[in-house]
Amino acid sequence: MLTLEVRRRPGTGAEMHRIAGPSATVGASSGNEVVVRARGVYGRHLRLLEKDGTYHLDLFRGIAAVQVNGREFNGGAIAPGDRITIGEATITVVDAAPASRPASLAGAPAASSEAALAAPAAAAAPALPATEVEYRGLRLAAYRLCREARLAEDLAIELTDFLDRELPPSEWAVGEFSGTAGFRPLASTFRENPALPPGMVQEIRAGERLARSESVAGVLTLVVEPAREGSGAVGILVRESPRLAARAVLFVEELAQLAGVAFSGLLGRSAEEEAPAASRSVPEPAATAPAPESSPAETVLRSTDDLKKIVETVEREVIDRAMRRVEGNQSRGAQILNISRGSLIAKLKQFEIPDYRYLRRERGRRG
């Protein structure tokens, strides 16, 4: 049995993983036997494989060398006591007994240990939220993550972890998008770095905020929040399998917008903190450019912890975005938002959302 002690960051608590089989994969994706979500860890990073009674470490293709006991390591035999460093994460080999060893030597059947470890993981993936109340809880949890993060990379890791836990069984990546470099993930649960179809990139470059591509491997959806001062455009990429409901895509679009607010502040602050104090110039009051107008969500995030205000602000923005997308069709809007048409009509009046049916008339005139 292979026993590993995993620490996601220096100074954090240890997680114990016991693998009874002859091999195990390690990476950030939820499909690995050992899931390690930390900066510098790819979706599928390495494989630990038993060969002739000894465990060997093999890197997946395209992965740079890791460090074992402080030295660069491209693969080979490992032994108890070895310390494997991947980015910020540290994996210590506690025991590397061959899988063929009788279970009685360990003092307990291997199957029962495996079942005890797998039980929490099996119960941790709830079904896709289907009610307005459940989505409200998701929105509030996402707001909290974005408010409490200190670094953009940490926020990306927390968001991918959150999405992977709350909206399984999809793969997620959070990062930045630029017209020249394309999408650059800061954190990902993909088993391999996904190659974006050129058509998706062209759609985003043309000004679209959501692009989709269907293939035999699943449906790729890229949601991009436009760049703000001090940051690049923030993007969330999801591979849906099976295909997520339309309301879940709306939630992802909303989350990308929320993350855009947080990434803007985080990246702007980190750049200012890294600059030497002598190089910082204080502009004259007369030459100070007017501050960009804050969005309603950003204003609420900065001004209050009142849950009622936060929920009302988020609900209004999500309903407004949905009705604009369906061009004022209330039946389709209610279906996407997963509420009754009567509830939608009441909320349209409550939040004074414009009648977007004029978009259909304009489209008809142009056609």
Image: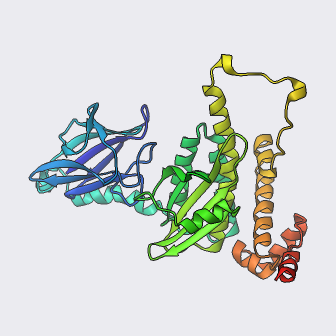
Give the farthest residue toward the top. Answer: 278
Give the farthest residue toward the left. Answer: 52
Residue 195, placed above or below residue 231? below
Give the farthest residue toward the front. Answer: 180
Give the residue drawn at x 70%, y 22%: 280
Give the residue drawn at x 78%, y 60%: 317
> Which residue occupies the foreground of this view, 38 or 356?
356
Give the residue drawn at x 26%, y 32%: 69
Residue 239, placed above or below residue 82? below
| Spot occupied by residue 156 in the image (x, y as percentages of width and height) | 55, 47
Label total for image:
0
- Image quarter for residue 101? bottom left
Q: Quadrant of the C terminus?
A: bottom right
Give the residue drawn at x 72%, y 72%: 337
Left or right placement of residue 126 versus residue 97 in this view: right
Residue 361, placed above or below residue 290? below
| Spot occupied by residue 366 in the image (x, y as percentages of width and height) | 84, 79
Left or right placement of residue 364 versus residue 60 in this view: right
| Spot occupied by residue 319 in the image (x, y as percentages of width and height) | 78, 67
Residue 134 in view here:
no
| Spot occupied by residue 104 in the image (x, y as percentages of width and height) | 13, 54
Residue 179, placed above or below residue 328? above
Left or right placement of residue 177 versus residue 336 in this view: left
